[in-house]
Structures are given as C-alpha cells and as structure tokens.
Amino acid sequence: VAESLQAHPRAVVSDWKNRNAFIILGAGTSFWPTSRTVVSAMPTFSRAHEAIRLYFQCKKQQKICDIFVTGGDPAKNGTSEAEAMATSLTEMG
C-alpha cells in the first residue's frame, strides 16, 4: 500500500509555495550490522533521499521547507522509526 504513495517518476516542483512540508512514512528499523545502533529499514532510504532532494530544491527557492518523519517502535528495538530517520536526516545536513 505504501508503495503506491511514492511518486513514480521522481517528483518535479516548479511552483514552490511559501511553506512546504515533506512527510516520510516509516518502514521499520533494524540494527546496524556491526553494532546495536538502530537505523531505518532499507525501504526508508529511497523515501528519505527523495525528501532530501526536494527539501534542498525548496530551500534554493528561499521558501520555508520542513520534513516530518513518522513511525513508532513496533519491533521493540528501543528507538522509534521516526527517531532513527530523524538522526539519519540530521547527519545528512
């Protein structure tokens, strides 16, 4: 179901609004192979990449741009999907 919410092909925005929001749906978490660090599950990376790409395009137009992340901790890994994704996004600038 979530796959149908992802844009195919990549989204193109030519008319940014004054305020823009990007919502990234969670897709689970897993542990980094060599540590107990909780990271977003693989399907989330394409969503995050697209949100980051659009975010920076939006910022180039000097508009207000926010990214919202979602997801709980159904796997009981100790970190929610939203927290893991927010950490990754912050690390990417």
Image (cartoon, rainbow, N blue to C red):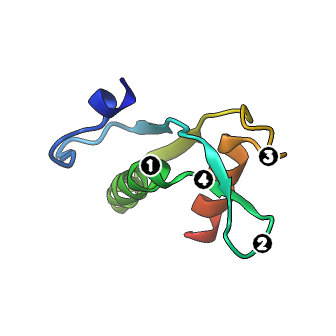
At label 3, the amino acid type is Asn
Task: Tell me how far mark 3 sits from mark 4, CA to CA.
Answer: 11 Å
- 64, 32: nearer the viewer: 32
When the figure is inspected, residue 3 is found, relative to residue 81, above or below; the finding is: above
At label 2, the amino acid type is Ser
- Where residue 59 sits, quadrant-wise, is bottom left
Disc 1 crowd rating (10 Å Cα; few below 14, some 14-19, many 20+) is: some
Disc 1, SS: helix
Q: Which residue position is annotated with label 3?
A: 77
Task: Tell me how far mark 3 sits from mark 2, CA to CA.
Answer: 13 Å
Seen at 78% across and 72% down, the residue is 35
Image spot of residue 53 (x, y percent): 35, 59
Seen at 72% across and 76% down, the residue is 34
Image spot of residue 46 (x, y percent): 38, 54
Q: Nearer the viewer, mark 3 or mark 4?
A: 3
Of callouts 2 and 1, which one flags the residue occurring earlier in the amino acid sequence? 2
Of callouts 3 and 2, which one flags the residue occurring earlier in the amino acid sequence? 2
Seen at 55% across and 38% down, the residue is 26
The reply to whether the C-beta atoms of the residues labelled 3 and 1 are less than 8 Å apart is: no
Q: Which residue position is annotated with label 4?
A: 40
Give the quadrant of the N terminus. Answer: top left
Disc 3 crowd rating (10 Å Cα; few below 14, some 14-19, many 20+) is: some
Let me know if residue 82 appears in the view.
yes
